[in-house]
Amino acid sequence: MVKMDDIAQLAGVSKASVSRVINNKQVSPEIRAKVEKIINELHYQPNLIAQSLTTKTTNVIGLIIPTRSNYYINTYDFITTCIDLLAEHGKVAIVVEMDDSESSFIDSINKLMVHQCDGIIYYHSSFIKVDFNSESIRNILDYLKKPIAILNKKGEQKAEKYFWFDNEKIAALAAEFLLANGHEKIAYLSAPLSEETARTRIAGVKNTIARHNKIFPLSHFSEGTRDIDGGYSACKDLLRKTKDFTGLLCFNDAMALGAVKYLSEIDEIAQGDIAIVGMGADPLINKIYPSLVTVYTPLRELIANAVSYVLGENSDVLENELPGTLYIDERLQKHCSHKQYPMWLQNAYQSSL
């Protein structure tokens, strides 16, 4: 069994230096490189129990996820990405679920602190009714004295730190793409406006269209649930009101896939082809050929910043707000029309249910 003494001898440094490298404390870059080289060569695994006694930490980070699933929060991606990033630092994760209520959030915090977690990462969804300024929430967050990262919510940095996507810019980027490609009449399929993210994204769409001195009439708006079925029904409702548009923006890629499905089922669309743009870079878009035009939301980068914060790494230089990036499949022609997607989208739709 490899011991720290062995690593120290082979690296030509002191045992204390090896300990500092393993516990991610400050050492010179030269010493860190030497020690990490030997660690990798010997496949050394530190004793987490001994390490926790030395550092007075548990090497455990708590994750809180919403019980209710939806297409905007991919809880599987969130959990696996957190576990991967934490494992790179010798940390493990404990996952708890919560429902929509504030009391459930408090219960989740208490469950994690029973395990003496070194920090907590919480992925917020707009359907969860948690007021982070309420007395009960402030009492528990201010009392913990542990780093808490809240993802997918914009907020004032207090005892906790917030990390979010710039949803207005994400929607604006999608609208700019359609306008730049000659689509002056744009319609929008939104998630329910009761959700904060939906209100922010529709603001980005409207403001962008207004900056180009174009009109966004009420008839060009339709609302549905943030999944494939919601996109299907919202698109159907939209076309009952108007067919006077050539560009269609969707709140997320799941709704865009639902719109594609509906449009592929009907025979006639006024004004010719409809260009469709989604948001979120959902893995489902890779099931169709060519992929949808979408605005990529950098979930891994957001999680990486949150992990760095709870681990105490460069917390003063982390970006809290991340923009999106436009993703265009090179196989797409200029208009990214619904008519370019094959009928076997029906199979992708069925497999996602």
Image: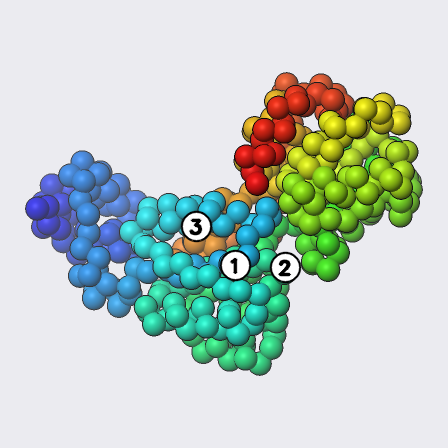
Contact (CB < 8 A) between labels 2 and 3?
Answer: no
Instruction: Give coordinates of residue 307: x percent, y percent.
Output: 43, 54
Secondary structure at badge 2 equals loop
- Frontmost of labels 3 and 1 is 1
Q: How many marks?
A: 3
Query: What label sits on residue 126 in the rendered view?
Result: 2
* Residue sitting nearer the eye, 196 or 272: 272
- Frontmost of labels 1 and 2 is 1
Structural distance between the alpha carbons of marks 3 and 1: 12 Å
Res. 186 visible in picture: yes
- Tag 1: amino acid: Pro
Contact (CB < 8 A) between labels 3 and 1?
Answer: no
- Name the residue located 57 percent from the left edge and 41 percent from the top edge: 353
- Check disc 1 and report the residue beneath it: 66
Q: How dense is the environment of label 2, judged by Cα within 10 Å: few (below 14), some, or many (20 and up)?
A: some
Q: Is residue 347 left or right of residue 256?
A: left
- Name the residue located 67 percent from the left edge and 30 percent from the top edge: 293
- Name the residue located 73 percent from the left edge and 60 percent from the top edge: 194
